[in-house]
Image (cartoon, rainbow, N blue to C red):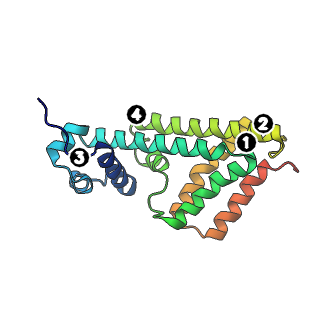
Amino acid sequence: MARPQAFNTTEALHQAMNVFWHKGYEATSMADLLAATGLSKSSLYAAFGGKRELFVAAFDAYREAREREMRRMLAHRPAREAIEGFFRKIVLDAGDGDPSRGCMSINQAVEMAPRDPEIRGRVLQDFTLIEEALAEAIARGQAEGSVGDAYDARHLARLLVLAFPGLQIMVRAGSDRARLDDSLNSLLFMLDRDH
């Protein structure tokens, strides 16, 4: 009979995710992961496999949580306020926490996606999910009148997805809050009805 696990797999995965999120894949050592999770090497390997498998599981857990949060935020009405809130949260989160972490998907778009097809596929899937969710919110906003209809919802969503990593990187680099707010105001102006 197998011995029951003496640790919480979900909690260990969360701790590993935080290490990968902060340090990146390459800079994270097995010693870092063992210290963060409190697991022995044999327990970590038995539960998750190696470093790469643990990273993929942690990255997927991050992506699922962020998708749920994004969809929850964008479901609010009016749609224009929901979209603005989604983007303003990026700036607000930087002031509340550690801006060196940024968005894990954007981090991996830079670190691993250029040379790792599996991670690239996940990052591109994330961009597609963001585009779909924003396009739905924009179309809803156009129908309710909170978003201008001068532009096609899909084109506006693609523009916002293009700006998403730029805003993340500016936040992570420590850009001035007033500058970030001004840039975001200019971007969101595209959603207004009167132009």
Marks 2 and 4, the one that precedes in the sequence: 4
Report the Cα–Cα distance between label 4 and label 3: 29 Å
Q: Secondary structure at mark 4?
A: helix
1 left or right, relative to 110: left
Q: Residues within 10 Å of mark 3 (few under 14, many from 20)?
A: few
Question: Which residue does the image show at 53% across and 63% down from the upper left?
Answer: 94
Q: Which residue is mark 2?
A: 152
| Residue 190 at x, y percent in the picture | 77, 49
Q: At label 4, which amino acid type do we have? A: Glu
From the image, state whether disc 1 or disc 3 is nearer to you: 3
In the image, is residue 70 above or below residue 154? below
Q: Which residue is mark 1?
A: 156
In the image, is residue 135 above or below residue 11? above
From the image, state whether disc 4 or disc 3 is nearer to you: 3
Report the Cα–Cα distance between label 4 and label 1: 28 Å
Camera sees residue 58? yes
Q: Secondary structure at mark 3?
A: loop
Q: Which residue is mark 3?
A: 7
From the image, state whether disc 3 or disc 2 is nearer to you: 3
Which label sits on residue 118?
4
86 left or right, relative to 52: right
Q: At label 1, which amino acid type do we have? A: Leu
Marks 1 and 3, the one that precedes in the sequence: 3
Look at the image and tell me in which quarter the N terminus lies. top left
Q: Residues within 10 Å of mark 1 (few under 14, many from 20)?
A: many
Q: Secondary structure at mark 1?
A: helix
